[in-house]
Image: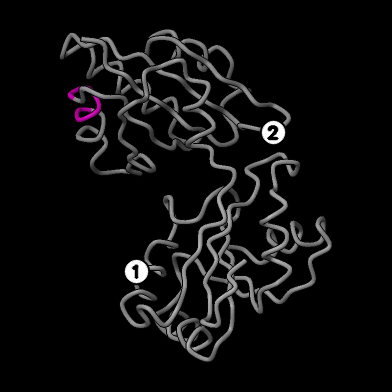
């Protein structure tokens, strides 16, 4: 924990599935702060209950209005220590955490300390078991919901380094088919590593080219559920 006198905003990673991945430091910090900011207070309260953490929570998510940010800034300005968590994993990756941090730095600067409490992340979890050369890679967040899908996967096929992205079970098959079509047009040979439900009971990692991965999930529709992380590597 921060031993200085200035207020602190802690960015706290929480388990992506297995509660055993919660760090001792994360528990200690959450027990010490004045308020915990979270995407969904119901999800976070379940986590806090498991670790016997009795602290107030407040929501902060994509739909939070500017007034919510102003209130958070005011709490820090008044000397309160806050923690920011997401529903699962490390805040600031494909969630509004980075926007809050940017605003805090803009308005408070050196008047506040921002400290990372590192821990679980589906991004690094899949990278660590991928078997690919991940010395260099790009992270692109979630695939586009509607417009921009062709451009997204076209850029993947043009990339000279692996690309990591999050995928929704509702779009997995559709996007695998699109990637297959684009790869045929470009005569590319993308290999994929797909992580499903990482650290959870039905955790699974599938490796293969786009044709093999598509065939697997089309013939096993019961597997098209949960949360996905995908690494795409374009083999020229």
Q: Looking at the picture, how far across and down is residue 177, in whole percent?
A: 35, 20
Instruction: Pick out the residue farthest to the bottom.
Output: 78
Q: Which residues are magenta?
A: 154-158
Point 30% across, 22% down: residue: 179
Q: Which residue is mark 2?
A: 200
| SS at badge 1 | helix
Front one among 206 and 212: 206
Examine the image and state in which quarter residue 191 appears. Answer: top left
Quadrant where the image shows the N terminus: bottom right
Q: How was this image coloured?
A: one colour
Give how far apart the Cα atoms at labels 1 and 2 are: 32 Å
Point 48% across, 88% down: residue: 77
Asked if the stretch drawn in magenta spans residue 156, the answer is: yes
Name the side, left or right, on which 70 lies relative to 226. Answer: left
| SS at badge 2 | loop
Specify which label sits upstream in the sequence, 1 or 2. Answer: 1
From the image, state whether disc 1 or disc 2 is nearer to you: 1
Residue 102 is tagged as 1
Point 48% across, 23% down: residue: 194
Dot 2, how many residues are within 10 Å of its Cα: few (below 14), some (14-19), or many (20+)?
some
Q: How many marks?
A: 2
């Amino acid at each position: 924990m921060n031993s200085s006198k200035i207020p602190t905003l802690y960015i706290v990673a929480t388990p992506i599935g297995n509660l055993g991945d919660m760090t001792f430091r994360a528990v200690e910090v959450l027990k010490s702060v004045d308020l915990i900011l979270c995407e969904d207070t119901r999800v976070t309260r379940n986590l806090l209950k498991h670790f016997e953490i009795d602290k107030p929570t407040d929501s902060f998510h994509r739909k939070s209005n500017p007034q919510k940010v102003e209130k958070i800034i005011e709490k820090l300005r008044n000397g309160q220590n806050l923690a920011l968590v997401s529903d699962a994993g490390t805040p600031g990756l494909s969630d509004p955490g980075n926007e809050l941090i940017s605003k805090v730095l803009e308005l408070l600067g050196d008047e506040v300390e921002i400290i990372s409490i590192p821990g679980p992340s589906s991004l690094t979890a899949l990278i660590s078991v991928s078997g690919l050369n991940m010395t260099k890679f790009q992270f692109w967040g979630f695939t586009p919901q509607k417009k921009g899908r062709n451009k997204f996967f076209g850029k993947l096929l043009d990339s000279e380094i692996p690309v990591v992205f999050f995928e929704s079970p509702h779009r997995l098959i559709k996007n695998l088919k699109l990637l297959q079509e684009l790869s045929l047009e470009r005569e590319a040979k993308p290999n994929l590593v797909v992580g499903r439900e990482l650290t959870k009971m039905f955790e699974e990692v599938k490796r293969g080219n786009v044709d093999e991965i598509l065939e697997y999930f089309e013939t096993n529709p019961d597997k098209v559920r949960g949360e996905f992380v995908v690494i795409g590597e374009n083999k020229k």
